[in-house]
């Protein structure tokens, strides 16, 4: 409990990283593994992570990300993608593959899960199903940032960017995005801070929690 609390106290949105320090392969794989193991609705894992360490691609990305220095000073830039609406339509190979695995090939269970999912998707989200997919990505990203803090690595979530420009860069440099299966969700940066952490400001628990007994 104490170590987890310490990690939450350590984590902050690091605005400038030490560009001379590199996160090790073991540490970045630990962070990504935590993202992979994160929970998702219906267990569909609708995410994909593009890990960028190439300085030239970071330089291309920075102007498209409101010229934020995190992009070029971070050791690793992780672009988080969310699956497109076609993934969740009836007859989708991805749904079939995912639910076959989860029902161990039992046809009756498989159909029941498919029916439940399509009812959920239509009644709860409809045309906004891609928003739902992005929400799942946020679960994974939060876990990744906490995992990084747990091992003393800083992070910063970045939503300030021009989507069209970032997408153009991804299409030119990644196979996953070029295939047209994903939408851009947002961006995480990982590395080591150069400045002391500012005071963490949060509302009191009593202001945000209501107990019903």
Image (cartoon, grey):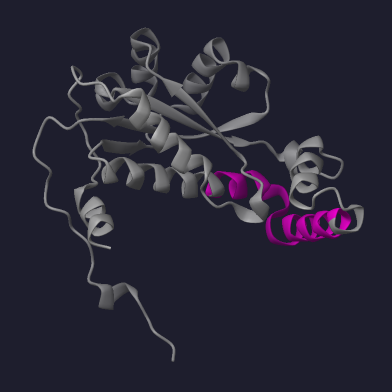
Please say whether residue 187 is visible from this viewpoint: no
Figure check: 23 above or below 171:
below
Residue 2 percent coordinates (x, y): 22, 61
Name the foreground residue: 126 vs 152. Answer: 152
Q: Is residue 170 above or below residue 123?
A: above
Query: Image quadrant of residue 51?
Result: top left
Question: Majority secondary structure of the magenta segment?
Answer: helix
The answer, for residue 107, to whether it is visible in the render is yes
Q: Position of residue 153 (x, y in %)?
A: 25, 36
Point out the image quarter for the C terminus: bottom left
Q: Is residue 83 left or right of residue 13?
A: right
Q: Residue at (77%, 48%) from the top-left corner?
A: 99
Q: Which residue lies at the image location 28% right of the left edge and 25% below the top edge?
A: 23
Q: With 101 as the anchor, is 25 left or right in this view?
A: left
Residue at the bottom extreme, as displayed: 213
Is residue 119 one of those drawn in magenta?
Answer: yes
Q: Observer-nearest residue: 50 or 177? A: 50
Q: In terms of depth relative to the viewer, which is nearer, 189 or 121?
A: 189
Q: Residue at x 82, y 54 (%)?
A: 114
- Closer-to-camera residue (34/82): 34
User: Is 6 a magenta residue?
Assistant: no
The span picked out in magenta is 110-135
């Amino acid at each position: 409990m104490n170590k987890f609390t310490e990690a939450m106290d350590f984590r902050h949105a690091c605005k400038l990283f030490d560009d001379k320090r590199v996160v090790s392969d073991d540490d970045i794989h630990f962070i990504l593994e935590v993202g992979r193991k994160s929970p998702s609705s219906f267990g569909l894992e609708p995410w994909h992570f593009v890990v960028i360490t190439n300085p030239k691609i970071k330089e291309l990305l920075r102007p498209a990300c409101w010229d934020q220095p995190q992009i070029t000073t971070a050791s690793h830039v992780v672009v988080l993608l969310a699956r497109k609406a076609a993934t969740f339509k009836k007859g989708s190979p991805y749904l079939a593959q995912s639910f076959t695995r989860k029902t161990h090939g039992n046809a009756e269970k498989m159909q029941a899960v498919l029916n439940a999912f399509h009812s959920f998707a239509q009644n709860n989200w409809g045309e906004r199903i891609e928003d739902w997919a992005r929400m799942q990505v946020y679960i994974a990203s939060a876990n990744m940032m906490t995992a990084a803090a747990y091992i003393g690595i800083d992070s910063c979530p970045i939503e300030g960017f021009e989507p069209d420009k970032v997408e153009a860069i991804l299409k030119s440099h990644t196979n996953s995005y070029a295939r047209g299966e994903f939408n851009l969700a947002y961006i995480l940066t990982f590395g080591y801070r150069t400045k002391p952490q500012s005071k963490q400001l949060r509302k009191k628990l009593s202001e945000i929690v209501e107990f019903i007994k």
